[in-house]
Each structure stands twice: as C-alpha cells, then as structure tokens.
Amino acid sequence: METVYLANLIKRAVTGPMWHGAALNELLTGVTSEQAAARPIPGAHSIWEIVLHVTAWAEIARARIHGERLLEPPTEQDWPPVRGASASDWSAAVDRLRESYRTLAHDVRHLEDIHLHEKIQGLDYSASNLLHGVVEHGTYHGGQIALLKKATAPAGR
C-alpha cells in the first residue's frame, strides 16, 4: 500500500534511518536550549524557530488531509514565535515535533491509497504531493539544523 510507504517516510524523517544522513531526532540530540535559541548567523532563524516551523507544517498537513486549515497560514503560524527559553520549553518543542510527525504518519497509514492522488479540496495539489513535501521540508530544514548545530557547538566539540 502506498499509504503505508508514505507513512513510513514521514516517520523516518524524524526517527531515521534516512539515506542522506541524520534524521531530525539525531540532529536534535544533545542540542541545549541555549544552542537552540542562538543566532550564530545574523538574519537566519534559530534551531528552535526551525523546529517550531517544521512542526507547524506537519500539523497543517495533517489538518489539510482531513479537509481543515486550507488557507495559507499567517506568518505567526508559519513561523511560530519561541515563547519560552527554558530547557523544559525546548524539550517540549522537540517532543511536539516528534508527536506531530508520528500523528501525521498514523493518519496517513489509515488513508486509502486512492485519496493520495486526489487534489486537496481548495488547493492546487494532491495529498501525495503535500505529504511528500512534508518529508522534503523536514529534510531541507534538517540540513539547516545541522549547520546551526555545528555553529553553536561548544569549542572543542
């Protein structure tokens, strides 16, 4: 079943293994709240902001496959602001990322294959296109996280 294959891709974007390198879980392992909030590249997003953004789009995709949230999100939903700075806030953000992908993968696994190729009502693309995009989106931002993690690593690491 195509839905099972796609659900596994979504899950593996976070848990791995991925053919290209580290999945999001591995990239985020050991990142402290200070590293996550840091901005080593002026004008670039922080790791924390990227995690919130990737999470938002997994949640938007899940809503869209259920016929909800079809409008483009406003900036504050697309790039949610970091609302806390503690280690527990950071841990909660990472847990939410994991849960958003796990829940999306679960829902995709229970779709019928025929629904993957239908356009999402009100949008110009199919559910399959959207869901492959979630995997690609997480992978793209994973590369940014890897670079930011290196840039924020303590000296000697």
Image: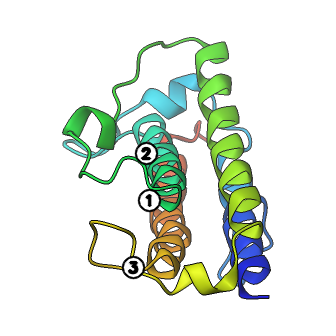
Q: Is residue 100 above or below residue 80?
A: below
Q: Tell me where residue 21 sits by quadrant.
A: bottom right
Report the residue marked by disc 1: 144
Describe the element under mark 1 as helix, strand or loop: helix
Which amino acid, mark 1?
Gln
Q: Tell me where residue 76 sits by quadrant.
A: top left
Q: Is residue 155 above or below residue 65?
A: above
Q: Nearer the viewer, mark 2 or mark 1?
A: 2
Describe the element under mark 3 as helix, strand or loop: loop
Earlier along the polypeptide chain: callout 2 or callout 3? 2
* Quadrant into which the N terminus falls: bottom right
Q: Give left or right: position of 155 versus 13.
A: left
Q: Nearer the viewer, mark 2 or mark 3?
A: 3
Question: Which is nearer the eye, 91 or 100?
Answer: 100
Q: CA distance from mark 2 to mark 3?
A: 28 Å
Q: Which mark is residue 119?
A: 3
Which amino acid, mark 2?
Ile
Q: Give left or right: position of 95 versus 61.
A: right
Q: Is residue 7 above or below residue 94?
A: below
Report the residue marked by disc 2: 50
Q: CA distance from mark 1 to mark 3?
A: 30 Å
Q: Residue at x 78, y 59 (%)?
A: 15
Residue 28 on image: x %, y %: 66, 46
Crowding near the residue tagged with mark 1, few <14, some 14–19, many ≥20 C-alpha atoms within 10 Å: some
- Whether residue 79 is visible here, answered yes or no, is no
Task: State the scheme by which the image is colored.
Answer: rainbow
Which amino acid, mark 3?
Lys
